[in-house]
Amino acid sequence: MQRRSTKQRETVYHALMHLYHPTAEEVYEYLRSEAPSIGRATVFRNLAVLSEEGRIVKLFFPDEVAHYDANTDGHYHFICRHCEKIIDLPATQKLSFPKSDRFTVDEQSVNFYGVCRECQK
Amino acid sequence: MQRRSTKQRETVYHALMHLYHPTAEEVYEYLRSEAPSIGRATVFRNLAVLSEEGRIVKLFFPDEVAHYDANTDGHYHFICRHCEKIIDLPATQKLSFPKSDRFTVDEQSVNFYGVCRECQK
DNA sequence: CTTCATGCAAAGTATTTGCACTCGG
DNA sequence: CCGAGTGCAAATACTTTGCATGAAG
């Protein structure tokens, strides 16, 4: 099953680069102007393909909705428990992948949770 | 809105201690024997309350289903991309919370992704 | 041409909510 | 007693799937 390069796939990818940790729905909304005829399922399918190819990263947070990130550098995230805002953090301390005979590691995710300044008021 | 101590809440908490990163559905299934009349919504509601109280931790992984963990020590997790198995890892390198005037941090989560030995065959 | 990709709508999952009833304090 | 908690079913939110059509190579 070889993969083709389609206009929709690249459109989805470009949307990712213009948005900050968008959900699939946000990508879909954004594309209403760029490619009005695109279907929601196509967005989901292409986000999955791009993520499988390692061009983007799929993120998981407490709001139960998947977010996507075109920045594939191993940075960290801060998530506000209150407004659910996501803030990129540089990967200050690099964690080395754990060694074990039970598995091999190829990726890591580091998230910090708390409350952002606006929500502390 | 003061909180009451109910039989169901403690039953859910005890289920968590007997299960390994269960989903809400798994807790519910487990409780069919201990408390057959418990409702699915009560399980969800109590998992939310317990997690809010810090007695358990809610975990987010690529399978889109929330998992819960009665082990609130800051340990790490390994998740197999293939079978979605979750393995506890000791927090070998402790990450310090980042300092910023934009937010305050009170919790962190560290996940490693890869393929477990069984799935490498 | 061949077959992967798309768009739509319908179907699945996981979780939340409305409501009358129950029970803890 | 009074209101938070419960159990049920219905509703919601997010994502996936089936299928006929379209387009990439």
Image (spheres, coloured by chain):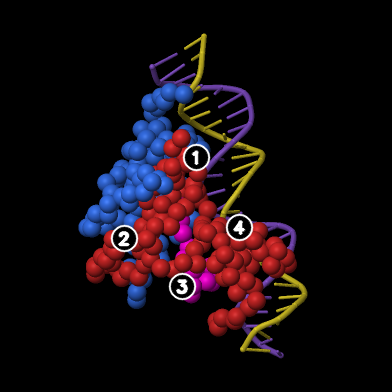
Chain colours: A blue, B red, C yellow, D purple
Q: Earlier in the sequence, mark 4 or mark 3?
A: 4
Same chain for mark 1 and mark 4? The answer is: no
Mark number, residue B26: 4
Which corner quadrant of the image does residue A32 belong to?
top left
Residue annotated with mark 1: A40
Q: Nearer the viewer, mark 3 or mark 1?
A: 3
Q: Secondary structure at mark 4?
A: helix
Residue annotated with mark 3: B54
Above or below: residue D16 compared with residue B38:
above
Q: Secondary structure at mark 1?
A: helix
Question: Which class describes the residues within 10 Å of circle 3: few (<14), some (14-19), or many (20+)?
Answer: few
Above or below: residue C16 compared with residue A8:
below
Q: Nearer the viewer, mark 1 or mark 4?
A: 4
Q: Chain of mark 2?
A: B
Could you tell me residue C2's position as x and y percent? 51, 13
Q: CA distance from mark 2 to mark 4?
A: 29 Å
Q: CA distance from mark 1 to mark 4?
A: 31 Å
Same chain for mark 3 and mark 1? The answer is: no
Instruction: Mark 2 and mark 3 in contact? Answer it, CB < 8 Å.
Output: no
Same chain for mark 1 and mark 2? The answer is: no
Residue type indicated by callout 1:
Arg
Query: Would residue A58 be visible to someone looking at this image?
Result: no
Residue type indicated by callout 2:
Thr
Q: CA distance from mark 1 to mark 2?
A: 42 Å
As rendered, which of B102 and A61 lies closer to the eye? A61
Mark number, residue B92: 2
Q: Earlier in the sequence, mark 2 or mark 3?
A: 3
Residue found at the very far front of the displayed protein: A101
Which corner quadrant of the image does residue A49 belong to?
top left
Provide the residue span drawn in magenta.
B48-61
B37 sits left or right of B91 in the view:
right
Magenta run includes residue B51 = yes
